[in-house]
Image (cartoon, grey):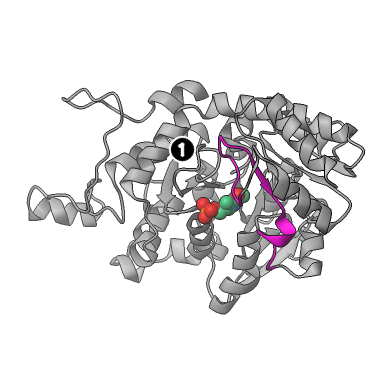
Amino acid sequence: MNDKTIAVQYGYKKGEDGSMSVPIFQTTAYEFRDSEHAANLFELKEMGNIYTRLMNPTTDVFEKRVCALEQGIGAVATASGTAAIFYTFANVAESGDNILIAKQAYGGTLTLGAHTIKRFGIEARFFDVYNLDELESQIDSKTKVIFFETIPNPAIEVADIEAIVDIANKHNILLCVDNTVATPILCKPLSLGADLVVHSVSKYINGQGSAIGGVIVESKSAKAKITDNPRYKHFNEPDLSYHGLVYTTLDMPIFTLRARLALLRDFGGAPSPFNSWLNIQGMETLALRVEQHSKSALEIAKFLEEHPKVKSVNYPSLKSSKSFENAQKYLKDGKANGLFSFIVESKEAAQKVAENTKIFSLVVNIGDSKSIITHPASTTHQQLSKEELVSAGVDEGLIRLSVGLEDSEDLINDLKSALDLI
Ligand SMILES: *Cc1c(COP(=O)(O)O)cnc(C)c1O
């Protein structure tokens, strides 16, 4: 099946009622046939529904579709993208371990790494995706995962994905890619050799800014890397919290299985069935939207590149972008979706432009059908120090646009009027 068919049909078998739309199973729990059935489910002798914190039939369809689009073998949905990222780290690292995170990452991922998991005894080490010596030189026997974004925001750059895959494979370390901005329509990191993909579903997959959600998808390579690898002892030894289960002995996608059985069980960030349904609706039009977002964004980026008040425009589909070649290599047809940034002369000028657009809304979100303008230095990245801002690629005069589905001529005129004010 190709992407557009998967996104609309995959993973749902109509029941007797013939419902064309995936039903919303708005339930907390599920009846067991008898106590043996219950025991079998808990012992994983039989797969089935127990409790919505762990699984839900609506969420299951959502997981199957994202998994198929990403060409993975297993997926687990979470209440938010942030939960998916935290669970990815928590699934492999414990006190004394470290993880390697690209400096060009989402603000919340940077604070999670630099501050919050530090208090759990897990050290985040940061690397520049354009300086892979910085990545490799920080790897040691306690490194549990390497993490970067296909199109990080607001830096909007495309790393040399295969070079990072080679480093992860050389050291036998799991590689996780946050594919939120590229989406599986433009890039499939698992097929390029990554072991795990995470998404903030809240963005392009939902596509209408109507629900928060996250997902972790694993490739076949994850289990192969984990098995008999001293870095991942806890997958290879009996899990005392699950009556001595040894994950690597199971013929299943064990990374996402453990995220479900241990982390959703103990941290509890499960998605609501209704949000899974909204995300299923959104996914149906993902391929069409990505096509249109990419087309409009390129037109607007070209307009801004010519504008005298704009110092620079950063969009990987533009020839002037330092990521142009990587975008051509790793993104389908070199398309880069609706997100890009540009720089005006000062923080004040950037704030003025952001406050004076009428069609672009001043909002901290991306991937919505409604166009969005953001000034990262005073919002999403406001909690970062000056040095952290520089390493995350955030200039004080940087403006980020998430180009929506409105008419691109209207969007250009809106920006033109706001730029006239500075
Ligand atoms: C928004 C975002 C997140 C966080 O996801 P939430 O769903 O808001 O929790 C993580 N990574 C990227 C790239 C994002 O854009």
Does residue 167 appear to the left or right of 238 in the view shown?
Answer: right
Furthest toward the right, the residue is 308
On the image, the x and y values in percent for residue 49 come to 23, 48
Is 225 part of what is drawn in magenta? no
In this orientation, which residue lies closer to the viewer: 258 or 412? 412
Residue at image point 38% right, 46% down: 252
Residue at image point 83% right, 53% down: 349
What residue is disc 1 on? 67
Query: Does any atom of ligand 1 lie closer than 8 Å to the CB of label 1?
Result: no
| Three-letter code for the amino acid on which mark 1 is drawn | Cys
On the image, the x and y values in percent for residue 161 come to 72, 42
On the image, the x and y values in percent for residue 84 come to 49, 55
**Number of numbered callouts drawn:** 1
**Image quadrant in which you'd find residue 120:** bottom right
On the image, the x and y values in percent for residue 356 come to 72, 46
Furthest toward the left, the residue is 34
Q: Which residues are magenta?
A: 363-383
